[in-house]
Image (cartoon, helix red, strand yellow):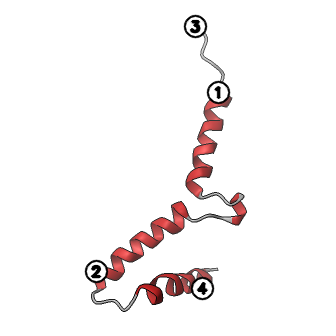
Amino acid sequence: MAEAVNNLYMTELIRQRGPWQKVEQVELATLEYVWWWNDQRIHGELDMQNPTEIESAYYIDQDSAQPAPAG
């Protein structure tokens, strides 16, 4: 699995947006890519939603499942 992720990273970021002039450019682009990968990327396993949408829906469900406080 790690090899697949590394290949996607190389294909989608490093080769497409290169050539790179400085290491700092690669570092910043990598940070942006990791943020996109973890938070914004649409997943087939998540019914074509991104993790942020799934997490928001989870907490909305948790709030609605809580009984109202007495009083």
- The residue that mark 4 highlights is 3
Image quadrant where residue 32 sits = bottom left
Disc 4 is placed on an element classified as: helix
Residue 8 percent coordinates (x, y) = 56, 82
Image quadrant where residue 1 sits = bottom right
Mark positioned earlier in the residue sequence (2 or 1): 2
Q: Nearer the viewer, mark 2 or mark 3?
A: 2
The disc placed on residue 66 is 1
- The residue that mark 2 highlights is 24
Residue furthest to the bottom in view is 19
Q: Nearer the viewer, mark 4 or mark 2?
A: 2
Q: Residues within 10 Å of mark 4 (few under 14, many from 20)?
A: few
Question: What distance separates the C-alpha of mark 2 from that of mark 1?
Answer: 47 Å
- The residue that mark 3 highlights is 71
Disc 3 is placed on an element classified as: loop
Residue furthest to the top in view is 71
The disc placed on residue 40 is none
Q: Amino acid at mark 4?
A: Glu
Question: What distance separates the C-alpha of mark 3 from that of mark 4?
Answer: 56 Å
Picture quarter with the C terminus: top right
Residue at 66% over, 22% down: 67
Q: Amino acid at mark 3?
A: Gly
In the foreground, 9 or 48: 48
Q: Nearer the viewer, mark 2 or mark 1?
A: 2
Residues under numbered marks 2 and 1 in contact, where contact means CB atoms less than 8 Å apart = no
Mark positioned earlier in the residue sequence (3 or 4): 4
